[in-house]
Image (cartoon, grey):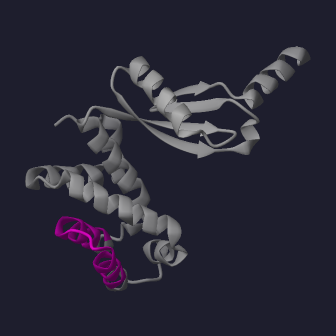
Amino acid sequence: MEISAGIQASLAGRYASALFELAADNGTVTAVESDLEGLATALSDSSDLRAVTTNPELSRSQQGAAISGVSAHLGLGDLTKNFLGVLASNRRLSALPDIIRAFQMIAAAQRGEVTADVTSAHPLSETQLSALKDKLTAREGRTVKVNPSVDPDLLGGLVVTIGSQRIDGSIRTRLNSLAQAMKA
């Protein structure tokens, strides 16, 4: 399995790579990915859970007990539970959001997918998202998963980020460019 050197270079990437390889060996990549998505949602929804994972005053055993309880509550699989236990014992729970993102990137790369973060001034309809996905898939030559978000400061247009590539077609950027040109 080929994993990008950029991902492997980071702490989160090394943990995510190790988890991915274990999941691949067990044939549970999809289940682990689903577990991590549920955990990411729980982290974003619960300030208490974020506090448990980032509080340096909590001991390893306290963090381990808390994350074990969360794992049971979320119904996470054994591999994911054990992995979270390792993170707690190594005091690496604070890196969990980055580890989840890295795991998702590795899993998507293995499936031949790429994720496009699409920011628009207003929410896009399903028809618009579908058309955008089709155009990006044709442009990239592989399956594109669209991750939409809204930023009213864009005024209009889109900003699409795929990996390190950024396509900025926002009105805000165009106005800023025009203002810079007028100053010169």
Residue 142 part of the magenta-drawn span: no
Q: Does 92 sit above or below residue 12?
A: below
How far across and down, in percent of the image, does residue 67 sit?
34, 77
Residue 135: tell me if it is visible.
yes
Please indicate whether residue 1 sits to the left or right of residue 46 in the image: left
Q: Quadrant of the N terminus?
A: top left
Please indicate whether residue 2 sits to the left or right of residue 132 in the image: left
Q: Exactly how many numbered labels are in the figure?
A: 0
- Give the quarter of the image for residue 170: top right
Q: Which residues are magenta?
A: 64-87
Residue in front for this viewpoint, 19 or 174 = 174
- Give the quarter of the image for residue 121: top right
Residue in front for this viewpoint, 119 or 181 = 119
Residue 68 part of the magenta-drawn span: yes
Q: Does 17 sit above or below residue 57?
A: above
Residue 3: tell me if it is visible.
no
How far across and down, in percent of the image, does residue 129 sit?
52, 35
Residue at the spot 76% in from the left edge and 36% down from the top edge:
155
Q: Quadrant of the C terminus?
A: top right
Residue at the spot 35% in from the left edge and 53% down from the top edge:
12
How far across and down, in percent of the image, does residue 175 sit?
81, 25
Residue at the spot 52% in from the left edge and 39% down from the top edge:
126
Please indicate whether residue 116 sits to the left or right of residue 77 in the image: right
Q: Residue furthest front?
A: 127
Label the magenta part by its dominant secondary structure.
Answer: helix
